[in-house]
Image (cartoon, helix red, strand yellow):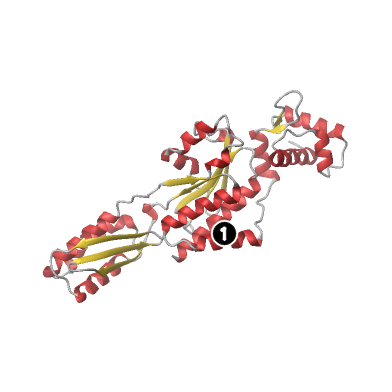
Amino acid sequence: MLDDRKLDVLRAVVEDYVSTNEPVGSKALVDRHSLDVSPATIRNDMAVLEEQGYITQPHTSAGRVPTDKGYRLFVDRLSGIKPLSVAERRAIETFLAGAYDLDDVVTRTVRLLAQLTRQVAVVQYPSLTRSVIRHVELVPLAGRRLLVVMITNTGRVEQRSVDVPDPIADEEIAHLRAVLNASLDGRLLTDVPRVVSGLPDKLPPAARPNAAAIFSVILETLIEHHDGKVVFGGAANFVVDLLFGLRDVLEALEEQVVLIRLLGEAAGPASVTVRIGAENTVEGLRGTSVVTTGYGGGDQDLARLGVLGPTRMDYPGAMAAVRAVARYVSQILAGS
């Protein structure tokens, strides 16, 4: 166990190294921090921290830098989540509020996280298995053509046109619309095929051919193009810190399976997960850290988002940004 003074020294080493990207010496710690002890005492404390694996010396003439173990102790015990300023929160809300559909929400979220943290932002689309139908609309177009619009609670909007086999009156369209919404509103998308398969029995025989064409299009929209898909942005933020490992990182980020593993599973609603260095099981990413959280589901997350960067990361700032953005995205999806 480390005493409070050694914990203070470790905190100072981490903060200075993250800020300067230079190994930290005892004199610099005394000059920059109110540790109220001599440089000799700081050197002794740093020797203990090094012996226990929390810091290391990159070469003999240098100061010390944190190890993965040192960063882990810093995140777990020595840092809090840095509160965002009013201006930052207002900027997040304004930027995300302009999104007009789910694709735009995801795209804006990636850009925003990358800009706020100066790390690589990673955002997963909400899962199909957790999405719920909010409304189905049938819009008459020219002749026998209709536009079928399906809206889910995650903000996903699917539009497909369909040509029905028989002429269709406005009254028939209104009746089909009412039947669909009465049957599907609030249903999980995974339940829709079973429910739709029983709807023809609720319609008069003359209406069934047109209904069958519409129902077929609805089922086609459930072939989820984005289910579980993960997008990322801000890779240029890596260049400074990972020149020698950049190729491995970029190759890993191009694999969807890797990105899904990277985001992992939520530890619980609203929790922020931090994996540091070798804690990442993905080959090529063991020199990086990942900060993630879930979004969009109240008691159950619909998907996850986060940032990935070098272990020399501003953890309090990254954790605050990830948590705040996830909260705003959740509010947008809930009200969409």
Please tell me in which quadrant of the rendered image residue 49 appears.
top right
Residue 155 relative to residue 184: left or right: right
Give above or below for 276 relative to 90.
above
Kind of residue at disc 1: Ile
Q: Name the one closer to the observer, 293 or 158.
A: 158
**Residue at screen point 55% across, 33% down:** 286
**Foreground residue, 308 or 133?**
308
Categorize mark 1 by other alpha carbons within 10 Å: few (<14), some (14-19), many (20+): many
Left or right of residue 296, residue 193 in this image: left
Image position of 111 with respect to 7: above or below: below
Determine the residue positioned at 65% across, 44% down: 314
Which of the image's four quarters has the C terminus?
bottom left
Q: Quadrant of residue 104?
A: bottom left
Farthest left residue in view: 206
Q: Residue at x 73, y 29 (%)?
A: 50
For the residue pair 287 and 185, the one nearer the viewer reads as 287
Callout 1 secondary element: helix
Task: Say whether residue 301 is visible.
Answer: no
Q: Position of residue 140 (x, y in %)?
A: 24, 70
**Going by the picture, which residue comes out furthest to the bottom?**
171
Q: Tell me the quarter of the image containing the N terminus.
A: top right
Residue carrying label 1 = 92
Left or right: 105 as drawn, with respect to 116: left
User: Where does residue 210 sit, x and y in percent of width and height?
Assistant: 16, 65
Q: Residue at x 81, y 37 (%)?
A: 28
